[in-house]
Image (spheres, helix red, strand yellow):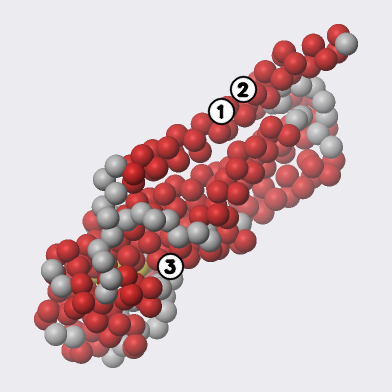
């Protein structure tokens, strides 16, 4: 075992921590994509690293069973995994998988509830509008929203929520919810991701309506009366209302037609290749460097 094993996790944790605290100078659409990919890859790195170390720890405890484990799943050297590392990896992995399962189950349950309610307006005077994904989904409004908002304001609401549905933002939200549940210190990453998704939908609505100020006023009006929600469905005035209104009252963000795709592709290439590179380094050290050191 060598410390290259933990390189993907260390890099992803560092990247997620930075992105959770530093605003990206990108169009919200590219910020959301980058943050969602980082969140998903960080969860994968955490669970994958833990499982990898746990498997090798089990092989340390039962060497005869290691013959039935694929070679790629074992370290490149025969040094045993320390008890402190192996036990911690096994416990953290089991906990992470349990949290992932519980989060996913809650997510599915919330979606089913939203789908069941999406067939008719919500019977509440609170102005609520949410995007419900799925074949039977759509834009779910409350009686309060229909009664208290003008036709022009409802147009803004529909454009905003349709953006969430069109871009499948529930998948982005799922990645953020997972990283926040499995790795609680990275909750700021989830919060920044949710804000980026809302800003993305705001910009789509502003482009469709043609009046950024009117979109900002509509969001502020809904936010004054709508309770906060954060889950599988995305509400109209869900996250960072003050930042969203200020952004809409300012200059439209650049589309980042070059820098956005390049950063997104670069991040995807780096994060997806870290595990494979680390595994190769691990076996390379075992097959090349360690024998050389033994000759000295």
Residue 82: x, y in percent? 84, 37
Counting residues from the start of the chain, the first of labels 2 and 3 encountered is: 3
Observer-nearest of 130 and 156: 156
Q: How many other residues sit within 10 Å of disc 2, few (<14), some (14-19) or many (≥20)? A: some
Q: How many other residues sit within 10 Å of disc 3, few (<14), some (14-19) or many (≥20)? A: some
Q: Is residue 56 above or below residue 154?
A: above
Q: Which SS class for mark 3?
A: loop
- The residue beneath circle 3 is 231
- Looking at the rendered structure, which numbered label has been put on residue 276? 1
Q: Which SS class for mark 1?
A: helix
Indicate the quadrant where residue 205 lies: bottom left
Q: Is residue 162 above or below residue 64?
A: below
- Looking at the rendered structure, which numbered label has been put on residue 81? none
Classify residue 190 as left or right of residue 252.
right
Residue 188: x, y in percent? 53, 63
Tell me how far mark 3 sits from mark 1, CA to CA.
Answer: 33 Å
Indicate the quadrant where residue 166 lies: bottom left
- The residue beneath circle 2 is 280
Q: Nearer the viewer, mark 2 or mark 3?
A: 2
Q: Is residue 131 above or below residue 18?
A: below
Q: Is residue 16 visible?
A: yes
Can you say which quadrant of the picture contains the C terminus? Answer: top right
Q: Is residue 100 visible?
A: no
Tell me how far mark 2 sits from mark 3, CA to CA.
Answer: 39 Å
Classify residue 240 as left or right of residue 152.
right
């Amino acid at each position: 075992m060598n410390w290259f094993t933990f390189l993907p996790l260390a890099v992803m944790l560092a990247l997620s921590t930075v992105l959770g605290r530093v605003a990206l100078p990108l169009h919200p659409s590219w910020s959301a994509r980058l943050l969602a990919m980082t969140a998903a890859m960080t969860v994968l790195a955490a669970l994958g690293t833990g499982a990898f170390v746990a498997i090798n720890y089990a092989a340390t405890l039962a060497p005869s069973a290691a013959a039935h484990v694929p070679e790629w799943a074992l370290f490149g050297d025969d040094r045993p995994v320390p008890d402190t590392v192996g036990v911690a990896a096994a416990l953290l992995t089991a906990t992470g998988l349990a949290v992932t399962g519980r989060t996913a189950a809650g997510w599915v349950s919330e979606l089913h509830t939203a789908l069941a309610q999406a067939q008719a307006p919500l019977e509440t005077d609170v102005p609520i509008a949410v995007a419900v994904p799925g074949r039977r989904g759509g834009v779910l409004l409350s009686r309060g929203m229909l009664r208290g908002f003008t036709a022009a304001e409802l147009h803004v609401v529909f454009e905003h929520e349709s953006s969430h549905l069109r871009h499948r933002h529930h998948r982005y939200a799922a990645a953020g919810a997972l990283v926040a549940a499995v790795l609680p210190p990275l909750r700021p990453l989830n919060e920044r991701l949710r804000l980026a998704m809302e800003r993305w939908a705001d910009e789509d609505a502003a482009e469709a309506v043609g009046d950024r100020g009117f979109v900002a006023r509509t969001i502020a009006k809904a936010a004054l009366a709508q309770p906060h929600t954060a889950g599988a469905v995305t509400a109209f005035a869900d996250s960072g209302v003050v930042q969203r209104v200020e952004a809409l009252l300012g200059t439209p963000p650049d589309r980042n037609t070059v820098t956005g795709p390049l950063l997104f592709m670069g991040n995807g290439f780096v994060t997806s290749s870290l595990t494979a590179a680390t595994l190769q380094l691990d076996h390379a050290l075992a097959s090349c460097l360690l024998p050389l050191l033994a000759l000295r």
